[in-house]
Amino acid sequence: MTSNKALLITVCCFLIALCLVCYKSLSWERSGAPDLRNRIVGGRLQKDDVSPYFYRWKPGDPVRYYDGANIGHSGVSNITASPFFHTLLYPLLEFQQRNIARIWLALEYLFILITGFIAYRLTKNNTQKIIVITFFTLFLLTEAWKTHVLTGQVYIVYSLLAITVYYCLTRTNKLMAAFIAGLAAIVLMLIRPNMVVFFFPFLFLVKNYSRQYLATLFIPVILLPAIYFSFDNNRTYWKDYLSAIQASAKVHQIAPLGGWALPVNGDTARLKKVEGWDVDEIMKHEKETNLVMYSENGNVFVLFDYVFKKRLSINMMGLLSGLSVVILLALYLLARKKFDIITLPNIALFGYCLYMVTDLFSPIWRHQYYGTQWLFPLLIAATVYKPANKWFYAGLLTGLLLNVVNTDYIKMEHTLGEYLILVVLLGLSMTRRLEVAGQAFGQTTKK
């Protein structure tokens, strides 16, 4: 079979899978997109000059602040998105929640398709195109994507922003690309603060860009936070946000394995109908469609508890996370000359693995939709495929398939797949020189 025919067949399979998943998503979305609600409520509170992170709705409060998952809880709320992400949601906040859920569903597919399209543009031969489309198609079928759509989550935004940064950094002589890269990078860090770890290794690439390019890149990196944090309210929200994250971590750690709940405080008045959603209709739909979420919690502390029947402390998790990042950076430094791995793909994959290490060590329960974050490194790896590295890609494919299947024969198959992907990506980025497709990367001279 010629590569053109294989590519055509792969594209046809992708289109069939896309249509199937989109059709199913219309049913999944009817489950209420519950996690989207707390983002919208957080944004509304913030927009109305109310700090959302310790807010508790009670009868008599505006319904626009109501979240059934946050009723009757004392102490910290379930709102954990950053204040900056709430700001990005402002254009949606005055719609009814039912309409917001429809808009968000469309945006989720727009974001994931743009991410896939950018990856496809980064390929230089049919084999790479086939692998990109195959990985992307399988990703649509993962339980991570299903739960992401069903709950109305936001993690696909991270992959979109990360691949935007990556794509723009391949355009070494385009100042507009430098500006967009800087803007996407700072937005990514402001909506996901521990993403700063992703960018640590990029410092090795500074010499590959002209001073003009770097100056343009850092304009939004410096200017956006300077403007944003010049407002007193924004600084206050961030102080509350950091305190709330610490409080949420403690709440998550007192919960039993397999679930968590905020402490309940007596008055739990619940509304049946909220902004176009009817709770009874949602429950009826879930019963009729026999909707099941196969969600696992793949945190290191969960695995440690399963094995040793003991919880890691929050401080110990932070220490182990930091040590893991430092050790991996040290190993990368030692390997950089031997394997000649100071290239954009190597750095991007390695940096993202560092971020995912911090994510896996998080004291906050990682539900299945967290797995959506693997889309970016899987697609970047696919764009730099070489036959000599085929066994690495067999490992990535296995990890991806483990996130597609739901079986009783493999214990925590999704979590196993995630850790396999992490190990393979670390091996690939630290022991193989990877080249940016179609770019004479690193040839720019300083001006």
Image (cartoon, rainbow, N blue to C red):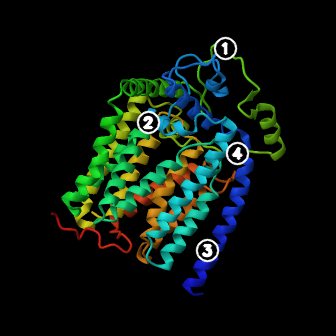
State how far apart marks 4 and 1 are (Cα). 29 Å
The spot of residue 206 in percent (x, y) is 23, 57
At x 64%, y 48%, the residue is 105
- Please tell me how crowded label 1 is: few (under 14), some (14-19), or many (20+) other residues with Cα within 10 Å: few
Q: Which mark is residue 408?
A: none
Q: Amino acid at mark 2?
A: Phe
State how far apart marks 2 and 3 are (Cα). 39 Å
Q: Secondary structure at mark 1?
A: loop
The spot of residue 351 in percent (x, y) is 36, 53
> Reading the chain from its start, which is encountered first: label 2 or label 3?
3
Front residue of 115 and 257: 115
Q: Secondary structure at mark 3?
A: helix
Q: Secondary structure at mark 2?
A: helix
CB atoms at circles 1 and 3 under 8 Å apart? no
- Residue on which disc 1 sits: 60
- Please tell me how crowded label 3 is: few (under 14), some (14-19), or many (20+) other residues with Cα within 10 Å: some
Q: Which label sits in the foreground, 4 or 1?
A: 1
- Residue on which disc 4 sits: 29
Is residue 430 in sight in this rendering? Answer: no
The image quarter containing residue 202 is: bottom left
> Reading the chain from its start, which is encountered first: label 3 or label 4?
3
